[in-house]
Each structure stands twice: as structure tokens, then as C-alpha cells.
Image (tube, coloured by chain):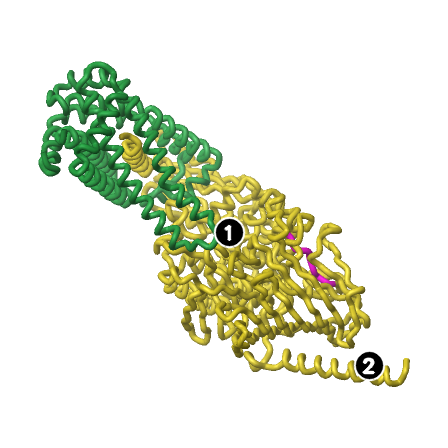
Amino acid sequence: MAIHKRFRNLKEVSFLMLLFCFITARLSGQVIFPKPLSPRTTGYDIKAKLDTREKKVHGEMTAFWVNQSGDVVKTVRLHMYMNAFRNKKSTFYRESNGSMPSNPKDSGWVNINIITDKRGNDLSSRMKFISPDDANPYDMTVTEIELAEACNPGDTVFLNIDFTTKLPSNIIRTGYSDNFYFVAQWFPKFGVYEPAGMRYALNGSWNCHQFHRNSEFYSNHSVYDVSLTVPSDYVVGSGGMLMTESTDGSGNKTLILRAEDIVDFAWTAWPEYAVFEDQWKHVKIRLLMPPERKGQTKRQMQAVKNALEYLDEHVGPYPWPYVTVVDPPMIGAGASGMEYTTLFTSQSSYIMPEFIRIPEMVTIHEFGHSYFMGILASNEFEEPWLDEGVNTYWEERIIDHYYGGMLGYPIPPMPDRAQARMSYVGSENRQAVSNAAHSWKYPHSTYGMMSYQKTGVILQTLEGIIGEEMMDRAFREYYSRWAFKHPSGKDFINVVNEVVTGNNGNAYGPDLNWFFSQTLYGTGICDYRVSGLKNYKEAGDSIYRSVAEIERIGEVMLPVDILVHFEDGKEIREKWDGLSRVKDFEYTGKDRIEWVKIDPEFRIRLDVNYINNSMTTDFDDLPLSRMRNKLIAFLQFFLTFFAL
Amino acid sequence: MNIISALRNGMYRSAKAWKSLLVIWFFYLLMTALLASPIKSAFSAGLGNSTITQMFSKDLNMEFLTDMGSSFSSVASFLRAGVLLLIIINIPVNAFFTGGLFRIITREDYSTSDFWNGASANFWSFLVISLLISLMVLASFFIFMLPLSFLMAGDGVSDVTIVLAGMVLFVLFFMWLGVLLLVADLSRSWQSAFVNNRCFAAIGYGFRQAFRIFFRGWPMMLLLMIIQCLFIFLVAAVLRRVAPQTSFGVLLLFIGSQLLFFLRIFLRAVRYGSVVSLI
């Protein structure tokens, strides 16, 4: 190569290296937190412009990934989530059973236009789409890039990417509708490299799954420096803190945003948002909603504060100084009920009576995800129960604590935890699969019930066995040990085992694996019943021999309490390990057994039939008579409503 | 006659017809008890000898009831089918009884024999009138709600616009319903004066007369409709909260609810009597 060309190349390389140094210095600079909360394995410096005419986002990004493993890594993998909406052949669309729109105008995609490394090497020819989950050759949601130079342990991979994202018009978490934009999963994003021994990895490899209909996400805690250019009249909400805002005189404004130690960066823009702010201790709460819903502001803010307070007390602190709540308008309803650590979306409407707590339930649930998958960044692809189910358990505790245990729906109203149990018990497919399955492998529409409700009920049952205080200790330790890391289900169970045995010795056995193996990782059901209640008396004798006959019908074996009540009012509480199929409790005395109850406090929430948990010699049908009389009156009025 | 006088006259006529109202009440009690009692028995059977009913002190606990599994689904299906059957049976039953009521209220002869004569004589014509007016009510409902469905399907329409539009349309429908009910009552009062089945002529008369006495008849009808709606909401709110814990309390609940239902029938008779008084 001629010397002047070599010199010019050297100048270019030096300039690029200086540029990268500047950017990494900015990315690793401390703006929000004096010390990083996470290892900051990845970082993204994105300059993006929203094109409202083409419904696109044009982006230039410098991203880095630090090889914190002991492996020499030759490839990197990026999520290209938006390609799930590219066409009907994507894995996402196939698994949706054809429910996506077919109009090309409605599609979404992300294209990498230019991709270079820190030396300026063009990597586009080294890119290929892969399908590690289902070998679908048409799915383009994961791309693998062969690096020009292998990345040694401790080295950093820099990628300079020019990309274009087309937003879909049918909002499934992300997209646009009219002039409303919710932009999530919008840029090429590193997967998570798991060295051997991390989570379940036997060998070091990329954990980078395709985008499935029933899956969410998994990524490293990152630093984000985002420059967003949008039309001046748009109100923007994002997962970052606003650093500066400027207008360029051509009808656009640019917001410089920074977020630290979060797993995802999403944003929204709509000219008609009304903005409300409130404060809870160190956390500034920013609420964006349609202006006509301002009547809902107070209850939304209160829900966030309740969640902050409860989780702070029972799990651990919320570290960020801000949180953004977005209540999308009706045209953007597809974006509601979703979480992006420091930004989440809720759901309410113009008229929402106070006694219907749907907005609070959604707000509290989605805020809870800032802990369960935000701080405790589990793999939502492989263990959806570890964030959705755990979060459901905490949502139920918060709702039932602050709102009197009444959700307001369905009719008649019932506690949130009761509604979860109903969903699980009432599901015909509750034994179809265990929680060991990856999210996209749950059959027959069981993903929601298994990840959310069944796991919530499992944790309610665990609470019933070990007590609420022990649950809190376990979660505090889980938070303390795994905050800003990637815990697996195994890690969570190990913490529970450690805390429970550390505080209770062998009261529950050497560990609680017997519990989790049956409930989380098994498909059996729990069902105990009182099969008989006998009171024998010999002729001429004044002494009764009474027997309470208990059976285990289900496969799951859990310790249960039995409460025996005699006619004279005396009660005896027995403890049974629940292992055998049959257990009899015999008594002799002057009084007969009047009733027997298994689990009288309804702590074993997994029991699928509470009705057979008890038996009495004197059945009380007064409530049923009351129901009948009310039903008669209701039917009478109902019929006359249909008469002229 | 003005509205107040018509209402007063209507109450008087209805009070005089108390024996017939009792008959109507009894038949409705019989019909609904024939559905409600087996449901109670089904629940009793499904709950066995469980103490779970102790958890139903305030209200039926849906979480525990659904633990009945397929038994609960069967009871729910039975209830759905039963309600549908009752709605269907109610059409001719209501036509029959309103025939009798209109006869005695119009002729001011309150004997039960006249009630039964009128019921049987007017049955077919009243049935046709009821069905035709009901069809008009249903069609009107869809016509009034059509703009709302267009709004909901449209892009960029805020939920406050939809809610406000829905409320306005519902109010307009309610007002139009008053006209249709007035027509129905006038048609039936005219028909009850004849022996022969002249239902279509009766409906024609009903429309003509409704617009002739519109400024007295329609406000009076709206007032009666509002009173009845408020009454029903009040009854629903009370019954929802009442949860007696003793057998005597449950008996009082039954008696009280039946008294309220009798009052409901009475109010309807007041409506018929008031309309008749206006003619």
C-alpha cells in the first residue's frame, strides 16, 4: 500500500479511535449515579430522528459490549425485534396464527444500513440472520455478526450502526396509530453472552432468542445516551432522564436523554399528551396521559406511590430518581400494560369508577416489573414465571393491602389473589405443562395462566407454608444478592432455601426443593379432602369414638393443618405432612366431632378444591336460601324489564 | 285531564285492581321459583356436607363456588337456559295478564272474572301488539347506537368523545322509548274496548292518539319511566347489601323482596291506568 494511503488510513483510524474513546468516555461517565449499579456490559449512544411522514425512525448508533467472560468471542448476536412484524413468515407471525395484518403499509422492520467496527471495518458482509429456536429461515429477529477480530476477555466490541426502523401500524407493544407513537424494541440490541456457569450455561455462548408471540425479552443492564429529534409539538416520554432540549428552527426539537443501568429503552411521542408530575421521596413521577383522563391522575399517582412504598419496604429500594408512566390513548391501546424499567404503560379510560381497580392493578403490576426483570434481570424468554409470576404475586399483595382486597371486577368483586387462583383452578389445561418450559413452548394458550396466575398461586402457597415474614426475608436477600444481575430460577430457589433453613433449621426439611419440584417444575395438582366423618357409640356407652378421615387425591404433597371441632366447642389442630394417601385422626370422648376442616385458613392456595376440604354433621344452607330468595327477586324484576 | 290528575286517577284504578295484581305477582313468583329452587338444590348437592357455606356470610364467594368444577358449569348452563326460557315464556304470559289488566282498568270493573275474561279475550291481539312494539324498540335501539359504533371504529376518536356520544344517544333512545311505550299502552287500551281482534288498527290508533296527546302523554310517560328506573336501582342496591344471617332474616328478606316486586307491578299498573285516564 502507498505510504500516503497508509498515512491517510492511519489518520482515519486514529480519528475513529478518538471518537470511540470520546463516546465510551461519555457512556461510562457518571451522570445519574455516582457509582454504577450494574456491570454495564453494554452501552448505546443513539442519535435518532422520528420521521412522522414515513413512520420511520432513522438512527445512528454506537454500541459497545464488554467481554466480561473468560472466553474468546468471535461473533456477536443482536436482537432485531422489529423484524417480527416484517411479514407473515416471521416466527412471531406464524405463532400468532395469522392474526397480524397483511397490508405492507402496516408492517414493521429494522434494517441495518451500515455497520462497522471500531477500526472502520465494514461488517455487513459478515452479518447473517439465524434462527436458534425454530430454524425458521424467514425469521429475521436475530442476527449474528462475525467479528473482524476476535474479542478477548476484557476487550470491548464497538459497533457503529446506521439503521432504519419502520414502525408497524398495528401496535403490539410498539408502533404507531395516527400521530401516536410508541417506540419499543426499536434498535439492534445485543443479546446476553453467558459464560459457562452463568444461569444454566454449560458452555459460553450467546443467549439471544428469536422474538416469539409468547415471549418477552432478556438483555444486559446498559447505559443509554439517546438524542431524539421529533416535531416540536410532540410531547415525549422515555425511560431516560432529560438532559437538554433544543429546537432547531425547522419545526423540530431534539431531546438529549440519558439512562443508566436499565435493560431497555423505550419512548413515546404524541402531541396531545398532558403531563403531570408528582414526587415520592427521591423519585420524580412523570405521568403522560390524554388530557380528558386527568380525573384519573390522582389514583394513578397514588398507585405508583403505593407500589414504591410497598416494594421498598418488603423487597428493596428503587434506585432511579425518576419513573415515567404512560397511559396511552385509545388509539395506542396496544402499547398499554408493558414495562421498560424506568418507563411503563398503564391502562385507564375517561370514565373509570373508583370501585373498579383495573388502572391500579395494571399500574402496580407494570411498575413491579422495574424490580422483576428491571433490577432482577431474569431471562423472560426461558423463565417467564420468574418475572411475570413473581411480579403477579407482589401485585396481589400490594392491591390487597392498599385497596381492601377488592378489585372491583369481575362481578361480584373479589381480592386480586382470589382472581388469580380462580384463573388457575378454572383452567382445563393446568396440567398440560410445567413452568420449566420456555415461553414459546407453552401449549394450548397456557402461557398466561402458567406464567402469571399459577406462579402467583404457587408463591401464595409458599407464603402460606413459611409465612409472610419469611417470604419478605427471602425476597430481600434475593434482591440484595441478585440486583443488577441475571438470576435464574435455580438462583431464586437457592436463596429461598438458604433463608428458610437459615431461620428455621430443618422445620421444612433440609431445603424447599420438594416444594418447588412439585409445584413449579411439576404438572401435578394439589387436592386434599375430608372423605368421612364418623362418630361411633356402643350401645349403653356414653363415650364416642370419632374418626376424621382425610385423603390426598392430588399428586402434590404439601404439609397441611387439620382443625377438628367437637360439639362442646373444643377444637384440636393437627399437623399432617400430607405425604400418604390416607390419614385418619381418631378421638374418644363424650362429644362427637361436629366438623373437620383441612387448611382452615386457606393457606394452601394451590388446592384446587376447597369445597371438599371440610365436612360437617350439620350442613348450613342458609346462605343458599338467601341466594335463592335474591335470585327469585332478581329474575322477577328482570322479566318485567322485558315486558311492555 | 292534566298529568297530575291522570296519575292520581291511574293510582286509584290500580289500587282498585289489587286482586288482579296479586294474581300476576303469584304467577311471577311461581315461574321464577321453578328456576331458582332447583338451582339452590344443585348448589346444595354440589357443596355436599362442606362447611364452605360459612364463607358465604355476606355474599356468594365466586372463588369457592367455582371450585365445584364441572358441577358449577352445569348449574351455570342450567341457569342460562332457564333464564332464556323464562324470557320466552314471559312474552305470552305478559300479554295475557296485561290483557286482563287493561280490561278492568279501562272498564273500571275490577272483578277477577272480568280480569280473566279480558285476559283471554285480548290475548292474541295483545300478543301481536307487544311483539310489534318490541320489534320497534329493538330496531330503534340499533338505529340509535349505530353512530356510536361508527365512532368507536373510527381512528383518532378519543374515549371522552365516545363516552359523551354514547350518553347522548342513550338519552335520546330513552326519550323515544317513552313514545313507543305510550303508543303501546294507547293501542292496548283501545283494543281492550273491543271484542274482536283489531291489533293493527289498535296500533294505528295508538300512534295517532300518542301524537294527539303528545304534550301530556309523553312527559307523563317519561316521568313514570324515570320513577320505575330509580325504583329498580334502589331495590337492586338494597338487595345487594342485605345479607341476613338467621332463618328469620332470610324469611324477612323473602317477604320484603316480594313486597317490593308487588310495588313494581303496581307501578306498572299505575302507568296503564294513567294512560287510560288521559284518553
Chain where mark 2 sits: A
Residue type, numbered disc 2: Asn
Q: Is residue B43 left or right of residue A22?
A: left
Identify the colour of chain B in the image.
Answer: green
Return the residue found at the far right: A1
Mark 2 residue element: helix
Whether the magenta-drawn stretch holds residue A485 is answered as no
Circles 2 and 1 on the same subunit: yes
**What residue appears at the point 18 percent right and 26 percent down from the top-left corner?**
B22
Colour in which the image shows chain A: yellow
> Mark 1 falls within which chain?
A
User: Closer to the camera: disc 2 or disc 1?
Assistant: 2
Kindly identify the residue that appears in the image at 55 percent across and 49 percent down: A448
Camera sees residue A542: yes
Q: Position of residue B211 (x, y in %)?
A: 21, 33
Give SS at disc 1: helix
Please give the residue where the numbered disc 2 appears in the rendered image. A9
Observer-nearest residue: B141 or A320? B141
Q: Amino acid at mark 1?
A: Val
Q: Which residue occupies the extreme top position in the image? A: B196
